[in-house]
Amino acid sequence: MAAVAVSMTGAPLVSVIIPAYNAQPYIDQALATVAAQTYRPLEVLVADDGSTDGTARCVERWRNAGLPVEWIEGRDRSGRPSVPRNRALRVARGELVAFLDADDLWTSRKIEDQVAAMQAHADLVLVYSMLRTFGATTIGAPVFGLKPWPTRAALDRSTLEHANTIPCSSVLARRTVLMALGGFDEDPQLQAVEDFDLWLRVSELGPIGFIPRVHGYYRVHASGISRNSDEQRRRAEYLVRKRGLNNFTFREFRRRHYLLTLVRNTLDIGMTLALYLREYLDRRRRVSVPLRTAVTYGLPAAR
């Protein structure tokens, strides 16, 4: 497919899409990190998936407080995040779209940094960053720390096919590209890997970019699918068959010895601290926002 190039003027509207199902315990925290973004303009679309708790009331409180948030009702429970995400995509007005799961969090300059990359380079179709896990995880847990490890971040379709290094809540993408692809595949067998499937298809339309900064936090639940590696692997195997992926490594499903995991996670903490320090110094010195792609770019100075 041909590469996509889009010119943007001024500050493009960013549509923030948040799928929600019984998210009352977490949605306030997620929306607080959206409200704290240094970038404007934003529109926030919370797409319901048949919630029966007080999620809608939480969203209404934020709307009354001045956050430009819209509740997109979903009366029937689909059980697949792809369905509410697509419903929100169809009504989104932004040139750019950011995804945030209802239980995840963003750092305050996440959107600002990513929009700078997209404005500076019209051929980019998607940019992403790192998330750090929190919640039901410990230093000895397999699900711990940074995703992706910065040296393993995919920069093109070929490297992305080896492993999904793109956390959904870290993505900013061009809406026209997402719509051209029909959004997320709503195949029930792709639940939990539907985002990887979309990133693979997006990466066929143009360059993707990676910003080596921690731009958010991914919540790990004791009962979440991220804790069920066998189920995740089964669905990944289905995706491999469906899309004919020949180079997928399944490396994220490998079982490591506890001591090896402990060492890796300790190094992960050191890497995280180094990344925080690098970002702090970059902003103090007003040096460029780091961006990695298959083609090297320079970016405007950080604020």
Image: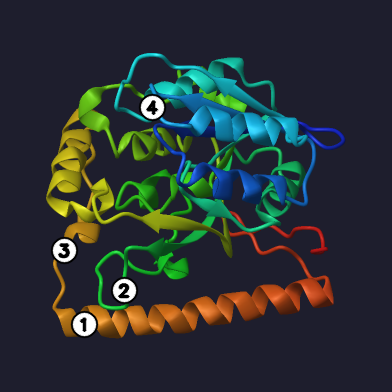
Do callouts 1 and 4 mark residues in contact (Cβ within 8 Å)? no
How far apart are the two marked residues, 4 and 2, measured between alpha carbons? 29 Å
Kindly identify the residue that appears in the image at 20 percent across and 38 percent down.
Answer: 240
Q: In the rendered structure, find residue 82 and report the number of the disc placed on it.
A: 4
Which sits earlier in the primary sequence, circle 1 or circle 4?
A: 4
How far apart are the two marked residues, 3 and 2, measured between alpha carbons? 18 Å
Does residue 254 appear in this view?
A: yes
How far apart are the two marked residues, 1 and 2, measured between alpha carbons? 14 Å
Q: Quadrant of the C terminus?
A: bottom right
Looking at the rendered image, the disc whose residue lies closer to the viewer, 3 or 2, is 2
Which sits earlier in the primary sequence, circle 3 or circle 2?
A: 2
How far apart are the two marked residues, 1 and 4, measured between alpha carbons? 35 Å
What secondary structure is marked by label 4?
helix
Kindly identify the residue that appears in the image at 26 percent across and 22 percent down.
Answer: 187
Q: In the rendered structure, find residue 138 and report the number of the disc placed on it.
A: 2
Label 1 crowd (10 A; few <14 / some 14-19 / many >=20): few
Looking at the rendered image, the disc whose residue lies closer to the viewer, 4 or 3, is 4
Which sits earlier in the primary sequence, circle 4 or circle 2?
A: 4
Above or below, 134 against 86 in this view is below
Q: In the rendered structure, find residue 294 and report the number of the disc placed on it.
A: none
Per the image, the residue denoted by label 3 is 254
Q: Amino acid at mark 1?
A: Leu
Q: In the rendered structure, find residue 260 and report the number of the disc placed on it.
A: 1
